[in-house]
Amino acid sequence: MSAIRRSRTAGVANLVAKHGCAAVHVASETGEGERTRFREARLTSVIVGVTGASGRLGRLVIDALSRTRVDDRTRFGDFERPQTLNEALQGVDRLLVISALGTGDMVGAHRAAFEAAARTGVRRIVFTSMQNPVRDNPFPPAAIYLHSEADLTAVGVPSTILRNALYADRRADLARCYARDGRWTTNLGDGGHAFVTRADCAAAAAAALCDDGHEGRRYDVTGPVLVTADDYVALVRERTGADIERDDVDDDAYERDRAAFTVAPANAGTFELFTGTGRAIREGHLCVLGDGVHALTGHEPRPLQDLL
Ligand SMILES: NC(=O)c1ccc[n+]([C@@H]2O[C@H](COP(=O)([O-])OP(=O)(O)OC[C@H]3O[C@@H](n4cnc5c(N)ncnc54)[C@H](OP(=O)(O)O)[C@@H]3O)[C@@H](O)[C@H]2O)c1
């Protein structure tokens, strides 16, 4: 992966399973080089941890790091059981905290991860956040990230924040459902969002972990273009051949439709955007076109249509 190749460090993955906190073993040396060279060089060992290593983003990060890995290891760590984190983070120098999504106290869970990192001697934290985490953003998890970013700063460990856009992967999965049904109900209005692929989020995270110079920085990790509802329908038509009918509704009607969509057996395993997500996009709260993927990896982000 280019981010690793141009890095002065080579990644070596060790990870963690359930609530996986992967301890990534990074070998650092003084010049550019490929894997074989790292093996021959005099290396300074650096351990990089990746939480959420059992999840979809975490696995992609591990894949990205694994291109230059020396060995693998997995550990268990649960943010909601902080006593498990000391062992999970043992010896970790740099830590990617992949945000958790749940019904519990997610602010407390993230804070526990940051505090454990500080306690166990982690020297750099990379955190996956979201766009525009401010008080008046109606995107439901915005409040979590608002607090978590502040908590990350408060622990005092040098950090990098990756404000990931919404995943293009899910938009692509949903497109197949809409194409099947011939219908898409939406409250997005004329708003646009730069959906980003998980793979690009993973490449950006791997680079933020392995490359130097990202401490104290915040990146908007987005796709290459803002995609509106018009664009989305046109893309789905073009890529699937299905003639989907778009039904623009207000937030109340959308919430009723979303609930029905989500419980349909054919939609098991996927779920539509929260009503607040559509509202946030419609009102421009998630209308960010960032250069995070390019700044971190050196390559351009892939567009949504690549996944359709
Ligand atoms: N940008 C977007 O569009 C978007 C959409 C949805 C979510 N997100 C955020 O991005 C994160 C990564 O996305 P993803 O697709 O990789 O999600 P995913 O496949 O659901 O993976 C989530 C990971 O977080 C771990 N986790 C959950 N609760 C945890 C806890 N209490 N302590 C430690 N680890 C915990 C999970 O471990 P287990 O498998 O063991 O439970 C899993 O490894 C999500 O967790 C969520 O915060 C972003």
Image (cartoon, rainbow, N blue to C red):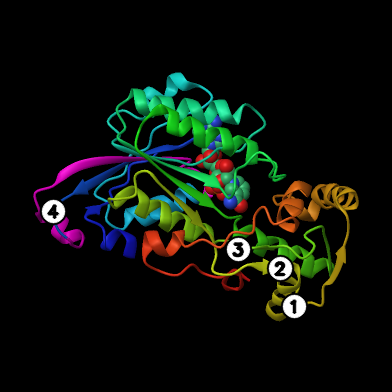
Helix, strand or loop at disc 2?
strand
Helix, strand or loop at disc 3?
loop
**Marked residue nearer the N-terminal end (4 or 2):** 4
Disc 1 marks which residue?
237
Labels 3 & 1 near each other (Cβ < 8 A): no
Disc 3 marks which residue?
194
Residue 30 relative to residue 277: left or right:
left
Dot label at residue 164: none
Disc 4 marks which residue?
30
Q: CA distance from mark 4 to mark 1?
A: 51 Å
**Marked residue nearer the N-terminal end (2 or 3):** 3
Q: CA distance from mark 2 to mark 3?
A: 9 Å
Q: CA distance from mark 2 to mark 1?
A: 14 Å
- Amino acid, disc 4: Thr
- Amino acid, disc 2: Thr
Q: CA distance from mark 4 to mark 2?
A: 46 Å
Q: In the image, is residue 46 part of the stretch drawn in magenta? A: yes
Disc 2 marks which residue?
228
Return the x and y of residue 230 as percentages of the image width and height: 76, 72
